[in-house]
Image (tube, rainbow, N blue to C red):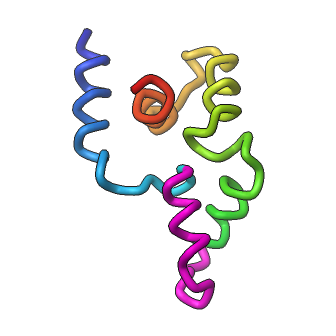
Amino acid sequence: MKKILLLAGLMFLTACAAEPGSEKWCDAKTEQPKSEWTGTDVSTYAKNCILESTTIGSEKWCKNLVETPKGEWTTDEATAYAKHCVF
């Protein structure tokens, strides 16, 4: 129960921010001029936005995470799962 409340709290705190690698973030980066991107933006975009299976919150990402034992999930993955795949 405590974990669920913690995840829900984290979700509400980060609800307005586009999480790097999420579909919302990828869409925003696609619209942003590439000259304004940082090195981290380029790396994150390449890693998470080019292949749908690694885009945080995509249907394939959620499915892949479900198939991963929960004990192997990172805190960030659990939070992203709750935010993008459950709610």
Q: Which residue ends up furthest to the top in the rendered image?
A: 1
Quadrant containing the N terminus is top left
* Residue farthest to the right, as pictured: 51
Which residue: 65% across, 34% down? 61
Look at the image and tell me in which quarter the C terminus lies: top left
Up/down of 71 relative to 77, above or below: above
Residue 64 in percent (x, y) is at: 70, 26
Q: Residue at x 58, y 60 (%)?
A: 26
Q: Quadrant of residue 32?
A: bottom right
| Horizontal arrangement in the rendering, residue 75 relative to residue 42 (left or right) | left
Task: Report x, y in % for residue 39.
Answer: 61, 77
Image mark count:
0
Q: For this rendering, which residue is in front, 4 or 25?
A: 25
Quarter of the figure with residue 10:
top left
The residue at 23%/44% (across/down) is 13
Q: Is residue 65 shown above or below 46?
A: above
Residue depicted at x 59% and y 90% = 35
Query: Which x, y percent locates residue 72?
Result: 60, 23
Q: Main secondary structure of the magenta part?
A: helix
Q: Is residue 63 magenta?
A: no
Foreground pick, 3 / 36: 36
Percent coordinates x, y for residue 50 in the rendering? 75, 57
10 vs 80, left or right, is left
Name the outermost residue toward the bottom.
35
- Please state the extent of the stretch shown in magenta in the rendering: 23-40
Q: Is residue 56 above or below residue 61?
A: below
State which quadrant residue 18 falls in.
bottom left
